Amino acid sequence: MTPRFSPAEADARWQAAWNDARTFVADDASPKPKRYVLEMFPYPSGRIHMGHVRNYTMGDVLARFLRMTGHEVLHPMGWDAFGMPAENAAMEKKVHPGQWTYANIAAMKAQLKRLGLAFDWSREFATCDPEYYGHEQALFLELLKGGLVYRKESAVNWDPVDMTVLANEQVIDGRGWRSGALVEKRKLSQWFLKITDFADDLLAGLGSLDQWPDKVRLMQENWIGKSEGLQFAFAPVAPFDRSIEVYSTRPDTIFGASFVAIAADHPIARALANANPDAAGFIELCKQGGTTAAELETAEKLGFDTGYRMRHPFDASIDLPVYIANFVLMDYGTGAVMGVPAHDQRDLDFARKYGLPVRRVVADGENVDPVFEGAEAYTGPGRLVNSDFLNDLDVAAAKRAVIERAEAGGWGKGTTVWRLRDWGVSRQRYWGTPIPIVHCDACGVVPVPTDQLPVKLPEDVSFDIPGNPLDRHPTWKHVDCPACGAPARRETDTLDTFVDSSWYFIRFASQPDDKPFDRAVAESWLPVGQYIGGVEHAILHLLYARFWTRALNHVGLIDLKEPFAGLFTQGMVTHETYKSADGRWLAPSEVNDGIETATGDAITIGRVEKMSKSKKNTVDPEPILDRYGADAARWFMLSDSPPERDLPWSEAGIEGAERFVKRVWKLVAGHQAGRTSPEALTRAVHRTIAGVADDITALQFNKAVAKLYTLLGEAEKAKTMSDADMDALLLLVSPMIPHLAEEAWSQLGRSGLIADAPWPVVDPAMLVEAEATIAVQVNGKLRDTIVLPKGIAKEDAEAAALASEKIVRALEGKAPRKVIVVPDRLVNIVA
RNA sequence: GCGGACGUGGCGAAAUCGGUAGACGCAGCGGACUUAAAAUCCGCUUCCCUUUGGGAGUGCGGGUUCAACCCCCGCCGUCCGUACCA
């Protein structure tokens, strides 16, 4: 045995061995039970970061463990390779986006390989490969045929910096999710996917995802935003002559209505603005309001009385004034609401400001007073009061009654309104999947025939000026119509990159040349058993992928609705932040022992935060691998913090991990064949086999790590260890520190790769202990512990406890009034 | 505002069903080895009291129970998500 383990030499050697033996190549035809482990594939920025290391290490441990426990495991890796950064690089560095992207992929792949991840690299692809996006174009056309794609002129979110359209999901606080620029509204002809067709099913499906975090399910539920209510028309009071459609989830409170409010860009408001400068001024004022959370919270409810009056549908004697109000949104519901101040907080604020009636129509306990006094609207349950034919009904029954009358009278309809909008997928960018459509003056929209796919991106493009290079390319868009042969134009928009990531997991499972995937093979792997990634994709990617899978199911391409059976969202890797004496952020490498190395000045240590370039608190994985090796880095990523929580990176932490790796090697190097273990050690080994298996299955790697530390400590103390126990220990650590495990396995003369060895078998007899340490309490306070045979009778345990000297002393002569015995755990004497 | 998660030593954290709180790691302290240091190994390490020993202790205040980090009620704090959604 070599006295030292040298990762610098051994890591690469074992990585090559796995590669040569095709150890981690998944076999579609395997008779073993199949498992699909997937981590969210990375954007090829050029360098991996610690977040990648953590993410992929977790998936790797699970994948290796599942292989060891008899599964055929699919654990693939690829690249989410289209997107804006490549175009930005093209502009800044005068390099083609493709060249930049593929160079980045090569660099990142080399880095990932150094981690020794058990990936099936034979299935690797990048979404910017023409093969991949060609198949994506075929799928797009299938969805078009299936009626799930349409084109519509609509107001879209325009990002003026990236010069492209954004989906609703990609606008955060009114700003582009990538550029951070304030989003503008523009009218454009856009391609949409009918995600709203599946709104109900996407919502219902969340109920079946019991291996997803509740948090993510809730976020999706809120995003889909189902609400049920009544949409109805208010009739005008002459001389006004237009009715107003409103939507309300509380039609039961209709007798409490005291005004109608319309959005600033409601057609009636705009018509009025043309005639009335004051109204126009007010509308202008509304538009100035900010959209950030803070601004909205403090924004005052403002209204403009149009002078119009609407008739109450159940009481012709009530006229409701029509206001233009700044809190009503045109793009939700009908852009108009009925105001019921007593039972809606916004309406109440508004009514108090403009002196409108506030009438109670739902009883708050005993309080039925029609004059509502409070400052907080009552939104709880209760029976209806002051409401004519609704009186005494509860809220739900009253809703039904109003909807029924509205429908019978023909002036309203029970309606479900969704927050979810159809997914606009057109992007005015170059580096994305070309939308496979030709526009012909005679034939209109013509799909590119399947045998002409892929529609490839042209190589000769320039990024000298902003805008879409495809649109200004001299020849690319000029083609003949596939239907009639007349000169026509290609669609120059490309698909949102979230389309690319909506089906890559299917392509990983099956990748024939002639079609996007083979249905039977794909179905044999899917759904993904365990999907691991950041919670930042809780809505965008995870909702789109769920939709896309349903869409493929809908057009008959796959028998699958939910792509990801299990989801795990891991925490971030964080690090302390440092600031210099004059307030500059400092990188960890610029700091030594509280001093800025360059200047010798004392620094300020800030909070522990997510690693980010702007705060300079990143740690590059590559030098860590150089210095400590892959196993220590992997071990640290799994240690201490529960995987769903943030992991604070520290130099001391990685050194601790390295210490563990060295200790394991030392144990192996000192191992002598043919000896025996003390029974306690063998018991510990079996306890640990069972415990670590449970912990890995539950993705509680930190607990598995703790158990392995304990076992190692016991093995070190024992001084002598059987071959079987030695092997078991190596097998247990092998998913986490595979390079050392292989090296030890080989040097101990074991045959084959440890990666191919089965998980050790637990001997249940070894889990049964002969004795139990029993806590003895007096009045609930611990006074002694006694060791008794396991399964001892309650009376005997009680007698042994009462015989304890410490207990006699603690009782101070008092007689026990009651004794509680929990078998093999404790005796509590109440005196 | 609404929704959710969380709150345990100096730090990251364990505690499977209401049953010995703090496993394991980091940092720290003491010791061994060494000319010395590093590395390594051994020991200690929740806080308080003078000890054999005792007391307090899981954000705060109550409650249920023989027994509460765990269940209930009310607060406080931190983080995340989200929004004039009618």
Image (tube, rainbow, N blue to C red):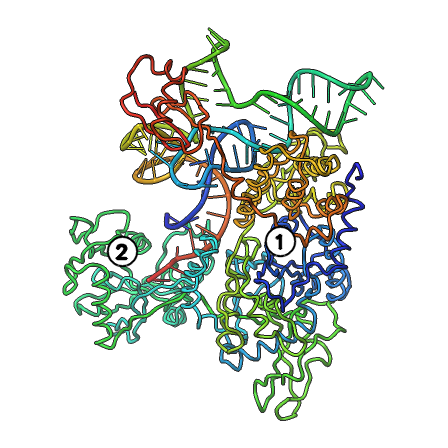
Q: Which mark is residue A68?
A: 1
What residue is rendered at 61% in x and 36% in y? A711
Q: Please provide percent x and percent y for residue A509.
A: 61, 67
Q: Quadrant of the C terminus of chain A?
A: top left
Label 2 and label 1: CA atoms lie apart by 64 Å
Helix, strand, or loop for circle 1?
A: helix
Indicate whether A208 appears above or below B18: below
Relative image position of residue A508 (x, y in whole percent): 63, 66
- Occupied quadrant, residue A682: top right
Above or below, comparing residue A270 to residue B12 in the picture: below
Q: Nearer the viewer, residue A256 or A531?
A: A531
Q: Position of residue A809 (x, y in %)?
A: 38, 13
Comparing A758 with A544, the one in front is: A758
Q: Label for residue A341? A: 2
Specify few, some or many for label 1: CA neighbours under 10 Å numbering under 14, 14-19, or 20 or more. many
Q: Are marks 2 and 1 on the same chain?
A: yes
